[in-house]
Image (cartoon, helix red, strand yellow):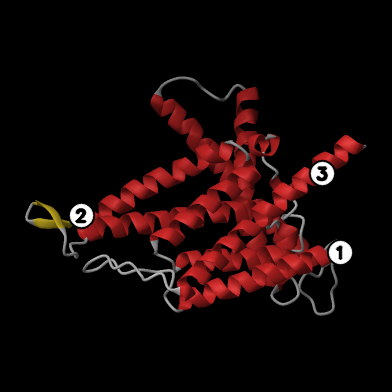
Amino acid sequence: MKMFKDGLGEGSTFAGCHPAVNLIFFLFTIGITMFSTGPAFLAVTLVFSWIYSILLNGRKAVKTNLIFTIPIVVIMAVINTLFTHNGATVLFFLNDSRITLEALLYGLAAAVLLSSIIVWFSCFNVVMTSDKLIYLFGKAAPVLGLTLSMIFRFIPLLKARFREITMGQRCMGRHVSGGFFAKIRQYTKEVSILISWSLEAAIETSDSMEARGYGLPGRTSFHLFKLTPTDKVLLAAIGASGIIAAAGCILGKTSIYYYPKVVLGQWDVLTVITFAAYIVMLAIPIVTDIFGEIKWQQYRLET
């Protein structure tokens, strides 16, 4: 489908929901993922994060996610295995050091957890735009709202500015194609330009917001956000499933023990309910965007 090829981006149906809906979803998702070490919960959050990332960013998200995921999995698994010698199942000895199965499995679990969080944050960066963050935090914590909005747009802004600087240097004939050290000097120069430009822009933004009275008591701001009936339904669904999953997480139903032996948790009724609620919560933005895109395509065909 075209939406998996190019990605929906900020035009996705879920991204068009009220900012409170988006924020609560990511708070529940990232928060529960951070404290879940059970294989089933890790697998679910990893799969759903990849699906939603591809849905938002298109096929290019596969390459980007692999660039982060593969090194994290390899490095964390190797480091934890080599430097942590806990565990009852010894695989072999390396320089009189015990290499255990439990350390390897824990390293893999931690790597999957971290990779999932990174992918979820990439989705957060697409859905939660700077105007949403300022809308949510502008009145209660104006400094925090402005800081968060600048942080989350900083990386894509730096990438766009660096491309612009590189193109400008090439048009001026300063982008050399000589030896290694010549390329390093040119690259250093471009990075220096980027840092100077970014610092000046940050100061100008701060001065501009202060001059316009940002954060002063009684100051209002223009926004187009309105809590619609659809937003209320999604908010109720995310809240209900998120609270159930969070309660299960607090009770330890999303985690297992790795040391001294791997002890898988018993799948009792509460664990099944927690797992089902977690799946429902993670599926909400994906289902919302797919149905929204289908309705949009049908509307285009009818008109």
Helix, strand or loop for disc 2: helix
Q: How crowded is mark 1: few (under 14 residues within 10 Å), some or many (20 or more)?
A: few
**How far from the left and from the top, in percent, is residue 64?**
52, 41
Image coords of residue 230 (percent x, y): 80, 63
Which quadrant of the figure contains the N terminus? top right
From mark 2 to mark 1, how far is it between C-alphas?
Answer: 55 Å
- The residue under label 3 is which amino acid type? Trp
> In this rendering, would 61 be left or right of 99?
right
* Secondary structure at numbered mark 3: helix
Above or below 208: residue 242: below
What residue lies at 64% left-to-right and 40% top-to-bottom? 160
- Kind of residue at badge 2: Leu
Along the polypeptide, which appears first: circle 2 or circle 1? 2
Q: How far apart are marks 3 and 1 (CA)?
A: 28 Å
Check disc 2: other Cα within 10 Å, few if <14, some if 14-19, many if 20+. Answer: some
Given residues 170 and 103, the one toward you in this image is 103
Q: Name the residue under label 2.
A: 82
The reply to whether the C-beta atoms of the residues labelled 2 and 1 are less than 8 Å apart is: no
The vertical placement of 302 against 198, above or below, is above
Where is mark 3, residue-wise? 296
Q: Image point 51% across, 22% down: which residue?
A: 176
Q: Which of 230 and 266 is in front in this view?
A: 266
Observer-side mark, 2 or 3, equals 3
Q: Is residue 108 left or right of residue 33?
A: left
Categorize mark 3 by other alpha carbons within 10 Å: few (<14), some (14-19), many (20+): few
Quarter holding the C terminus is top right
**Residue 222, which numbered label?**
1
Q: Distance between the residues labelled 2 and 3?
A: 53 Å
